[in-house]
Amino acid sequence: MSIQAWRLESLSATYDQALFLQELWSTAQGRPFESSLSSVLSAAVKVGGELPSVSYLHLGQHANFLTLLIAPLVLLLGSWALPLVQVSLLTAAGLVLWRIAARRLPESLAIRITAAYYLSGAVIGPALENFHDLIWFPLLGFLVVEALLEQHNRQLVLAAVMLLLVREDSGLVLFSLGLWALVRQPAARWKGVGLMAVSFFWVLMVTGWIQPAVDSSLSDRFLQEKFGHLVDDVSGGTLSVLVAMLRHPLAVLQAIVSPPGATLGFLLALSLPLLLIPLLSVDSALLVAVPLLIALVSQGRSALSVTLRYVLALVPGLYLGSVLWWQRHASVWTMPWIRRCWFGALALGLTLTLVANPHRSLSALVPDSFSPWVHVSPSAMLERRAALREAVALIPEQASVSADTSVLPWLAQREVLIRFPKSTQYLDRGGEPQLVDWVVAFPGYYTPLAPVFKLERNLQRSIGRKLSKLVASDNYQLMHCHRGAVVLKRISIQAGTSAEAAIDPRSCSWLN
């Protein structure tokens, strides 16, 4: 929790943190799923070139019904609600895992498996990431399997329903849990069949009817990005992808093993904290079957990353499959060399995770780059925080704003917030284009990173060019330029909204 707090204060939290905060804030205001930041990522904007809309519903991209329950907490705690929920849910999942393992294994072995959960990159990475709606997967997945093992029908129904409400694709996780029950649990076979059937039809209903009724982003963007290499036409939604995969099994097989090095590294990294036991466990294979298949056949940089949120779909199967394997092979635990090897595997996995600095959450301690050396000290981070706080203090609470990525989480609890420098215009509730009232950018934030990282260098240049263009126009005037933070105000806003008068653009180095 302390690291998440530091992320917010040191400007390490970025786009998704702001998107979910705005969505939950809007939900608390009586406008469920609404988010102008989510609109920026929609197919209409990214593919069609339209302006972001203030009334856009995030439901068109992700059906995260369960996450909306956090909305009242956002009213009470503001931006601190999200990291609190994120860390709490992942921590609670580990406690449920301990309960399941302790009933079936020696205490020392149950402790080792629970420690592997908390020390794995597959949990540490998503815990240190921006807030996301997949944080429910480990807890609910553990509860579903526990209910199947213990024959707790009420718990099974409640946990399964909640799991389906996490997201449109969470039915894939539940389908695998049902498949495991069908094959490996004779006393729960019909329950497994029921879980498979319910999850299959739920995914088809949500992705084929509910989400397309809101927005076409699922087929026009998300399915195309992940499965465009397998399916020529994804307009038919999830069903068309499924049919195409069944018709072209060789293409699917090729996608699963390609690239072979990355695929093997992904599987080894996931299994290393568990001493590679998931690679031997039939239970693990069945419990992760469908989400692992999707991860391996998907394209894009996020598909095979061990520290990104998507890997949480695999966590219940990996850890519970290991518990069940050890239950059948408990005698192996008595071998002293096994314990030493496991300790080494945990230490190696944790070291690799921390050195990788997932999501730059540990940048205060771990350099962003070792060669060449790039490290922003904690004191420098606090100076950047102070500079941004000074700039953000000028912005009225309800004003419409365009802000760059590092600034967005600080301004997300408002109706209109879009991404700078992508746009300074949006569509109001009447569908009419409007200019934002304020522009907030922090080009100085990227200065330490720009010499080494191309993304930050290009972004800083793009921000500078856009700011210069806006100031040179008749629409905006420069209100603040200090310690790398820049604030512009739309000229048509009535005087008196800010305590400061406009300043000479020639005094701002970011506009030269």
Image (tube, rainbow, N blue to C red):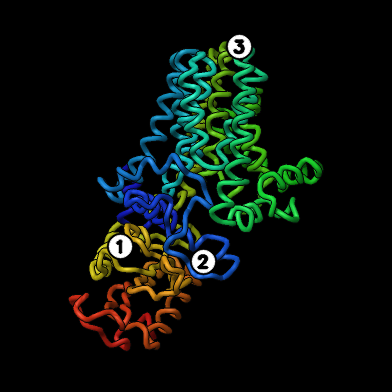
**Cα distance between the residues tagged 3 and 2:** 54 Å
Query: What is the secondary structure assignment of the residue under circle 3?
Result: helix
Query: Which amino acid type is marked by label 1?
Result: Ala
Q: Which residue, as the protein is rendered here, is positioned at the far front?
A: 430
Task: Say which of 163 and 445 sits in front.
Answer: 163
Which residue is found at the position 59% from the left and 68% from the top?
48
In primary-sequence order, the first of circles 3 and 1 is 3
According to the picture, the residue beneath numbered tag 2 turns out to be 455
**Cα distance between the residues tagged 2 and 1:** 21 Å
Which residue is found at the position 53% from the left and 12% from the top?
334
**Cα distance between the residues tagged 3 and 1:** 60 Å
Query: Which amino acid type is marked by label 3?
Result: Ala
Query: What is the secondary structure assignment of the residue under circle 2?
Result: helix
User: How busy is the neighbourhood of tag 3: few (under 14 within 10 Å), some, or many (20 plus)?
Assistant: few
- Counting from the top left corner in percent of width and height, residue 91 is at 39, 32
Q: Residue 380, which numbered label?
A: 1
Which residue is found at the position 63% from the left and 17% from the top?
190
Residue 121 visible in this rendered orientation of the protein: no
In primary-sequence order, the first of circles 2 and 1 is 1
According to the picture, the residue beneath numbered tag 3 turns out to be 187
Which residue is found at the position 44% from the left and 48% from the top?
129
Q: Image height check: is 352 above or below 281?
A: below
Q: Nearer the viewer, mark 3 or mark 1?
A: 3
Q: Nearer the viewer, mark 2 or mark 1?
A: 2
Q: Nearer the viewer, mark 3 or mark 2?
A: 3
